[in-house]
Image: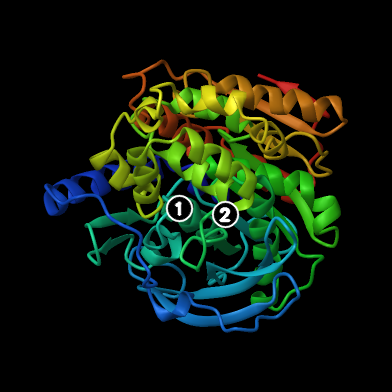
Amino acid sequence: MREHARRDASSPSTWPLRVVAVAIITIAAALAGAGVPPGVAQAEPVSSFYIPPEQIPAEPGAIVRAQPMVLFAMPPGAGGWPGKAEQILYTSRQQDGSPVAVSGTFLAAAGPWQGAGPRPTVVIAPGTAGQGDQCAMSVAFSTGLSFDFRSAFSASANQELPSSAVWSALGANVFVTDYIGLGTPGMHTFVNRIDSAHAVLDGARAANRLAGVGAETPLVLWGYSQGGGAVAAAAEMAPDYAPELNLKGTWAGGPTADLTAILAQIDGALIGGAIGYAINGLMARYPELDTAIDRVLSPAGRAMLNTLSTECIGDVILRQPFLRTATLTRDGRPLLEHLNEIPEAAPALAEMKVGNLTPRAPVLITSGRNDDTVPYAQALQLAKDWCAQGATVTFRTNELPPILPGATIPNHYGPEMIDGFGPDNAITYLLDRLADKPVPGCSFA
């Protein structure tokens, strides 16, 4: 592996990009959408591209549709500026096994691979963007930001600009999934372990097809927060769901492994409205839970869940900051208390928990001890669960001190920038896996 590849990958200039993106969303929404009432469910798609044909290929990872995309937001590469990508619609599987079209973005390698071994495929699972179709990462990928004026003003950002830019600059083929139901029809099943893993692994299959390479192509998975949970689920489901893929390693940063712990953590935090994303996703897959939850929601609570299903995370920060689920229920108790009492909730929450299967390829898990959004303890427990099953896991603790607890951006995104792009970063870890360097069975730091 060339040494300059590592230096470029860990350049501090990439650290602030996600924080800046989130800040831009919030400021832009405040300027353009102040005084605009919350949105209502939108029947119209973002564009006709996201509406699949009546019949889609049954094979997971099959390409349904593709069109060129110009990358104005990416820095100049080997092919000059602006860069080029493809907007993709591909086949995946819902939780029940039924085929579904999923959107994403494919960046074909424009220069030589700077790491060891053959050119890899890198699949990136995005962090939380929202639940409205306009929040899909591919919508904002070309320009870095997208704005939607169809109902209430909505803004979203390409949060994966730093990761996709770095891996593309290193010469990898890069695929960024939008997840099931984000951009495409249907409810986005936020942090659904099974749907998310399918979207990631089938995204790898689609990327290999687009690149004209076989399943033996080295593959690494990259994700933080919601993305960390998605790639963690993909890593443990790969041996059964996609055994042909040559998965070399995974970075699961701040993984959303235990939904119950996360719901308790963010209730009342800056992005507390994201709880609505999770509840909406659960109700979409578990009709019996939908009925049970409906009994405890107030009319205003049901209306709020409908509103949240149309919003991006920047919209939540602007319109429903520090939302408490006690304001959504008939009796004024937090929604998690009710979930603990609803018989239909326990099996659904248990099925969503990551850590009951065993990854075969090495995994790096990172988590901030003071993360106020995705709890450190549940990330550590995931590592312990996997290690007990014989997996190869490297767990690293980020000791960034608490800054404005509950504000999300410094305490949650800060560790991402450090662990993803700082010294001894996740890129270095994955480059070592692609170089087939040995790694101990389990280590904790």
Report the front residue among 271 and 81.
271
**Residue name at image x 35 percent, y 43 percent:** 304
Write down the quadrant of residue 359 in the picture: top right
Q: Do tag 2 and tag 1 residues touch (Cβ < 8 Å)?
A: yes
Q: Where is residue 444 in the image (x, y as percent from the top left)?
A: 70, 20
Q: In this view, does 151 lie above or below 26?
A: below
SS state under label 2 = strand
Can I make out residue 396 in this image? Answer: no
Q: Where is residue 337 in the image (x, y as percent from the top left)?
A: 53, 22
What crowding class fits label 2: few (fewer than 14 Cα within 10 Å), some (14-19), or many (20 or more)? Answer: many
SS state under label 1 = loop
**Residue name at image x 46 percent, y 28 percent:** 373
Task: Determine which residue is flagged by label 1.
Answer: 160
Left or right: 124 in relation to 436: left
Q: Position of residue 161 (x, y in %)?
A: 42, 55
Task: Determine which residue is flagged by label 2.
Answer: 124
Mark 2 residue type: Ile
**Residue name at image x 34 percent, y 50 percent:** 307
Mark 1 residue type: Glu
Write down the quadrant of residue 89 in the picture: bottom right
Of labels 2 and 1, earlier in sequence is 2
The tally of labels here is 2
Report the front residue among 10 and 177.
177
